[in-house]
Image (cartoon, rainbow, N blue to C red):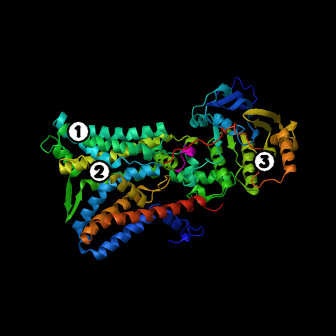
Amino acid sequence: MSDSTNHGTNELLALDGVGKTYGTVRALQDVSLTLRAGEISCVLGDNGAGKSTLIKIIAGLHQHDEGVYTVGGEEVRLASPRQALDRGIATVYQDLAVVPLMPVWRNFFLGSEQGTKRWGRFGPLRLDADGMRATTREALARMGIDLYDVDRPIGTLSGGQRQCVAIARAVHFGARVLILDEPTAALGVKQSGVVLKYVDAARDAGLGVVLITHNPHHAYLVGDHFTLLKRGRMAGSHPRAEISLEQLTTEMAGGSDLAELSHELGRSEPRPDSRPGSPPSSPSDPDPDSREERPQP
Amino acid sequence: MSTDLLAQDRPAALRRLFARPEFGSLIAAAAVFLVFAAVAEPFLRVSSLGTVLYAASTIGIMAVPVSLLMIGGEFDLSAGVLVTTAALTSSMVSYQLTAVTWVGVLVSLLVALAVGGFNGWMLSRTKLPSFIVTLGTFLMLTGANLGVTKLVSGTVSTKPISDMRGFASCRWLFASEVTVGGLTIKATVWWWLGLLLVGSWVLLRTRFGNWIFAVGGDADAARAVGVPVARTKTLLYLGVGFGAWVLGQHLLFSFDTVQSGEGVGNELIYIVAAVIGGCLITGGYGSVAGSALGALIFGMASKGIIYAQWNPDWFKFFLGAMLLLAALLNSWVKRRAERGPR
């Protein structure tokens, strides 16, 4: 990792004019973002705004085809999540953070398994299962999660606990950048608070955090910088000092869209299936963030 | 089994025993044993144990890699005919090209591994379901087994190779038997035990084993934390190739000739054994030890029905019922594990 270009700014990663096209769909264009150590940078946007595409590029699941992506001052094109992890970038996904049927400790070490020390060079051949269980317990306790039975399938934990385990895992394995994909989207108010507390703890531990969310209230609770995405483009980029929660909420809802919506709602009874705050996307705007097909066994 | 067996207030050790994937098959194996012990007097003879173990081992050898593959989230419908392919290759290479059986045995290993590798490569390249990919390999191998054999030897079976150099040592390795106090143990039983130990250890105590669970449980989540998903699955298919090679060599060296049409349908028996042993058909959950219990249930039922002088036609019926019961139990366990308290 070269320090020559950092000049003491603690810059962990930076995107400059980054874009991505899937076939004929421009999912993302001209997005710039800088993340420093000990900072929480929030990326806000509605469904289909390009949030998922952005994290997939940062996390190495997809490659950008425009702009420059630098990690620690060094330009990169990450070909796999492994390469991102090797650079200290860990991603906690909304729905694929963990493998539900596997025990907590196996999930905790997945992809970074710990071998037996006694076997020396052949250590990786034999898992140090007891050591891994103990380490899992300790690492969770440090994050304030008290879980004795780490042999439980992780699917039996609550959604908030699973997110916390995934965050604790990233912190334990020395991540310097933590990408969180909608960590509070599926959670209730109380559990969201618990997760945001761990996000804050990670920042205090000196990590840089990219928090993806569509909830301006959650973002404003912890964020230091706010980037707004709209239909794949940047619709705003503000440090905390320059924006209030009200402004953020209004911008997030998209001023004119919101006015139009209130106009419509004022004229007619809202349909039972109408969802305020998420204006219906036009048919010519396919959702580039729809999940990839996963191979069925 | 009542739902409170997995309840949170039970002691962890007890709960863990009930929650083990092979727990259901252990109960089932004990039940099948007791039924046949009660109704069929010859079933309890020492010599019968050897027969049952032999029947179980010929399924168990394949059930080990097939269950690992299923835990890894994939099927292999070509596993049954691949056994025949391995036997035919070994026999024909030895007969046509050399007069040393070991050459055929080694070429056969390469062919079996190549077919496994092809399945894994096709799967990761095309992203098609393994059901389709291996159905294709299954049909191709079924046709090639018959076609090539007829082309080479003019009939549907291979020529005898028992007069060749190396036959005796190959036979010793793959098809010998030892008798201790009336109990005859065939070589396949040792192969089965060996594969069981290695397979179970790999699954539970190695990094690769952790990856097997992960790619079967959620391939996307596994990839996101850096698990090489395609490589893991391909290695599992190579494992099936290895098992098919072992069993194929056993068939060749115990019967001297091979019928080219054999093996069709056995792939389902391996899958059933794995499912009875506690493997989830959707992957991510199961055990190798369970596959052995599944194979043992097969062995006991197929021989027990004969000892009890029942109509053997009922064997398949019994098997189907066991499969459904096991699949229901497994999916119940999975729901318990995934839902939990929210």
- Nearest-to-viewer mark from 2 and 3: 2
- Left or right side of B117 for B337: right
**Marks 1/3 same chain:** no
Residue at mark 1 to residue at mark 2: CA–CA distance: 20 Å
Chain for disc number 3: A
Chain for disc number 1: B
**Type of amino acid under label 3:** His
Task: Pick the residue in front: A247 or B25.
Answer: A247
Q: Looking at the picture, how far across and down is residue B223, in whole percent? A: 55, 41
Q: Quadrant of residue A26?
A: top right
Mark 2, other Cα within 10 Å: few <14 / some 14–19 / many ≥20: some
The circle on residue B104 is 1
Q: Is residue A176 above or below residue A191?
A: above
- Residue found at the very far front of the displayed protein: A268
Task: Pick the residue in front: B266 or A276.
Answer: A276
The circle on residue B263 is 2
